Image (cartoon, grey):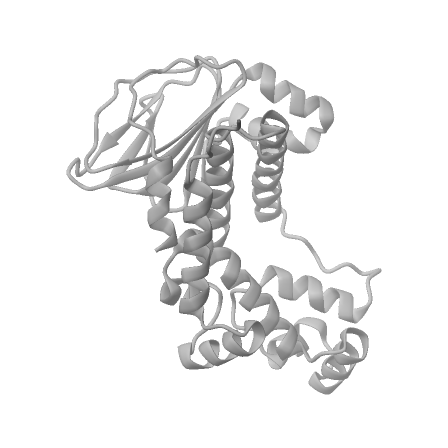
Amino acid sequence: MAKDLRKDLRADFTSRQYMTSRDYEIFYYSDLHFTPTTAHSHQYYEFYFFVKGDIEFIIRNEERVRLETGDMVLMPPGVEHYARAIDPEKPYQRFVFWISKEYYEIFMHVSSDFGYIFRQAAEGRYVYHFDPITFNAFQTSLFEIIQETHQDRYGKSTNVNLLISLFLFNINRSVHEKDFPPKIRESATLHQNLIFYIENHLTDQISLDDLAREFYVSKCHISHTFKDNMGISIHQYILKKRLNLFKDSLRENGDILSTCSLCGFTDYSSFFRAFKKEFGISPSEYLQQITRESAKVMQPQKPKG
């Protein structure tokens, strides 16, 4: 499956707790069992994304968090921490992303929008949890960064900086919008607010009854307004958005059934028919296609000349 190709991007675990690069270092660890580390702190920021295992994260010997898939920990400079295995024999997967203070400041000079979660960490908020779709999107972004750092292509440094920039922005936006949920915009038209609502509830079950209650208008008015402005029905719009979300998520998840469920589909046979009608191939054929593409990308480039 597509996700199995990620093993080529795994790093061998190192207990080193200092940076050898100036700006950043990023690792994807996938170990069969836990290797203990002692309490430590850094002179840089550490992002820790927990994928799999049975782990407790200890911060300053005060805060203890039993991690779940989808958890992110952000450790600012100088804060002592370490991970402890509750069951050291369970497979242990995580991403570790180090960013120097100087590199962080470069982004802050561009925009303070990059700094929300860093400011939160400075105030003692270290642990965040993301839903499966969001967390899979972050994993995909991290793999893209790692993959680019492993290749020798034109503009590599520029593209890595762009990928990290987008990654940091999306992390900040996701946390900020979870803390301050976007509200329906009073100045927007009904169909614009319908789109806005759907975008933020795409993996939930959305019915016309739900929308009628949310916007205090009749189902008939909602249906006509949306189709008049968008050219398709609300049902068709939601279906198309979910199908495209499935395509993006499958590249990371690699499992058709679980990805289908995560994207809001409750009936596989209906999903299968809709996917084949929309894209002309079956979900399994699409998975084979992206697997071949990923394998091609991971092949070493032949030297020129």
Asked whether the viewer can see residue 132, the reply is no
Q: Nearer the viewer, residue 16 or 144?
A: 144
Residue 266 in the image, given as x and y percentages of width and height: 43, 75
Q: Quadrant of residue 30?
A: top left
Residue 212 in the image, given as x and y percentages of width and height: 67, 78
Q: From the viewer's perspective, is residue 276 above or below residue 241?
A: below
Q: Nearer the viewer, residue 219 or 286?
A: 286
Q: Residue furthest front?
A: 305
Q: From the viewer's perspective, is residue 30 above or below residue 60?
A: below
Residue at image coords 48%, 27%: 124
Q: Residue furthest right?
A: 187
Q: Is residue 284 left or right of residue 239?
A: left
Residue 102 in the image, given as x and y percentages of width and height: 59, 14
Residue at image coords 48%, 55%: 133
On the rendered image, what quadrant is the N terminus found in? bottom left
Count of marks overlaid on the render: 0
Q: Residue furthest bottom?
A: 220
Q: Is residue 139 left or right of residue 16?
A: right
Q: Nearer the viewer, residue 272 or 208?
A: 272
Residue at image coords 42%, 78%: 267
Asked whether the viewer can see residue 124, the reply is yes
Q: Residue furthest left?
A: 89
Residue 211 in the image, given as x and y percentages of width and height: 65, 75
Q: From the viewer's perspective, is residue 245 above or below residue 77?
A: below
